[in-house]
Image: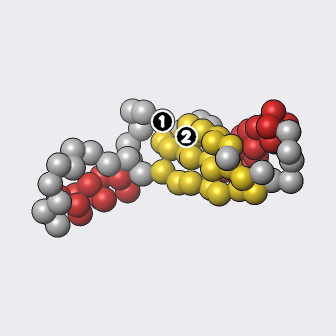
Amino acid sequence: MKANIIVTLKNGLLDPQGKAIEGALKSLDIPGVESVRQGKIFEVEIAEADRAKAQALLQMACEKLLANTIVENYRIELA
C-alpha cells in the first residue's frame, strides 16, 4: 500500500524558509502570491493491506521519526 505523509509547521510558528520562498516568488514578479508556508512530503510504500493497520503503523512512524510533533502537524493519505 502506498501513502503520502504531509508534514507542515504548526500555525503561528515562524517559517523562515517559507518567507524566503515567498520573497523570491515576489521578486520574480510572479503575481498573486500572498504567502508561502513550506513543508515536506514522504512517499511511503508499506507492506500492509489492511488500511487501519497501515494507518496505525504510519502514525507511529510519524510520531517517532518523520514529524516533530511539538512544532509540526502531519497528515497521512493512503492511496
| Residue at 38%, 56% in the rendered image | 17
The amino acid sitting under disc 2 is: Glu
Return the disc, 1 or 2, that comes first in the chain's sequence. Answer: 1
State the image coordinates of residue 37 (x, y, percent, origin top left): 38, 47
| Closer-to-camera residue (10/36) | 36
Quick check: 50 above or below 3? above
Residue under pointer 1: 10
Quick check: 36 above or below 12? below
Q: Is residue 17 visible?
A: yes
Residue under pointer 2: 72
State the image coordinates of residue 27 (x, y, percent, origin top left): 15, 64
Residue 62 is labelled as none
SS category of the residue bearing label 1 = loop
Category of crowding for the residue at label 2, using alpha-carbon neighbours closer than 10 angstroms: few (below 14), some (14–19), many (at least 20): some
The amino acid sitting under disc 1 is: Lys
In the rendered structure, the answer to whether residue 38 lies left or right of residue 20 reads right
SS category of the residue bearing label 2 = strand
Residues under numbered marks 1 and 2 in contact, where contact means CB atoms less than 8 Å apart = yes
State the image coordinates of residue 25 (x, y, percent, origin top left): 23, 61
| Residue at 15%, 54% in the rendered image | 31
> CA separation, marks 1 and 2?
5 Å
Category of crowding for the residue at label 1, using alpha-carbon neighbours closer than 10 angstroms: few (below 14), some (14–19), many (at least 20): some
In the rendered structure, the answer to whether residue 45 lies left or right of residue 31 reads right
| Residue at 65%, 57% in the rendered image | 43
| Closer-to-camera residue (24/30) | 30
State the image coordinates of residue 35 (x, y, percent, origin top left): 27, 45
